[in-house]
Image: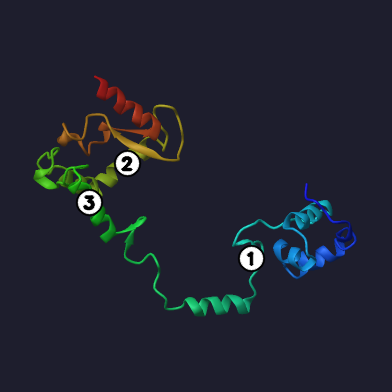
Amino acid sequence: MAQVRPDLRHQMTPSLLTLLYQEQRKGAPEIARYLGCANGTVRYYLRKYGIACRPRGWHAPRTGTLQSPETKQKISQALCGRPSHRKGKRGIYAQATLEKMRVASISRGCIPPHRRGHEHWNWQGGIHRPNERQQQQVECKRWRLSVYQRDAYTCQGCGQVGRTLNAHHIKPWSTFPECRFVLDNGVTLCVECHRLVHQRQTKR
């Protein structure tokens, strides 16, 4: 507990602390300098008298306060036309910084050079783009909607109604292209049931 001088006990009244701390918005260090005591002494009496202390830190003076319309207008005019500090940046680092980090990692032998297209180890002949384009076609969207309507927007695995649903192909999309848009080849599943179905298919 903070050591309190006897002469301060008569100065640290609830009315004085309320005036300085709440009405004049002075901080504990400023009040301590004004009264000639320590910060801990001021906070001790604030707690003793039940006066809510503001959080410490550089942002504390404005915490919980409302801006007046005039102040909001001044801030808006000051920021008007100023470019965003995030302009040209991607994620945490700027694009130029990411490129420098990548080159430095390659030079140290930490990671192999990034390869794209046919130079990548997992290249499969460029089959992803055609499949992605076909899945975005109107015909695929109509097929998916027809499956949902037939099953009354209900998961056929657990009975969940609505929320996030998937139209699952009973015969896989990749191996049965002729059955991709056949209504009887689709079934409505929720996300969890859809994941479990594909897990079972993978284990076979």
Q: Which residue is mark 1?
A: 62
Badge 2 amino acid:
Ser
Q: Which of 200/55 is in front? A: 55
Q: Residues within 10 Å of mark 1 (few under 14, many from 20)?
A: few
Tell us which disc is closer to us: 1 or 3: 3
Secondary structure of the residue carrying tag 3 is helix
Secondary structure of the residue carrying tag 1 is helix
* 187 relative to 27 in the view: left or right: left
Mark with earlier residue (1, 2): 1
* 22 relative to 131 in the view: left or right: right
User: Any mark on residue 188, and which?
Assistant: none
Q: Which of 145/49 is in front? A: 49
Q: Residues within 10 Å of mark 2 (few under 14, many from 20)?
A: some
Tell us which disc is closer to us: 2 or 3: 3
Badge 1 amino acid:
Arg
Mark with earlier residue (2, 3): 3
Badge 3 amino acid:
Ala
Q: Whole-percent x and y of residue 164?
A: 41, 40
Mark with earlier residue (1, 3): 1
Residue at 23%, 45% (x, y): give it.
Answer: 135
Secondary structure of the residue carrying tag 2 is helix
Q: Quadrant of the C terminus?
A: top left
Name above or below for residue 186 compared with residue 55. Answer: above
User: Any mark on residue 146, and which?
Assistant: 2
> To which quarter of the image does residue 151 belong?
top left
Name above or below for residue 124 compared with residue 31. Answer: above
User: Any mark on residue 104, and which?
Assistant: 3
Q: CA distance from mark 1 to mark 3?
A: 43 Å
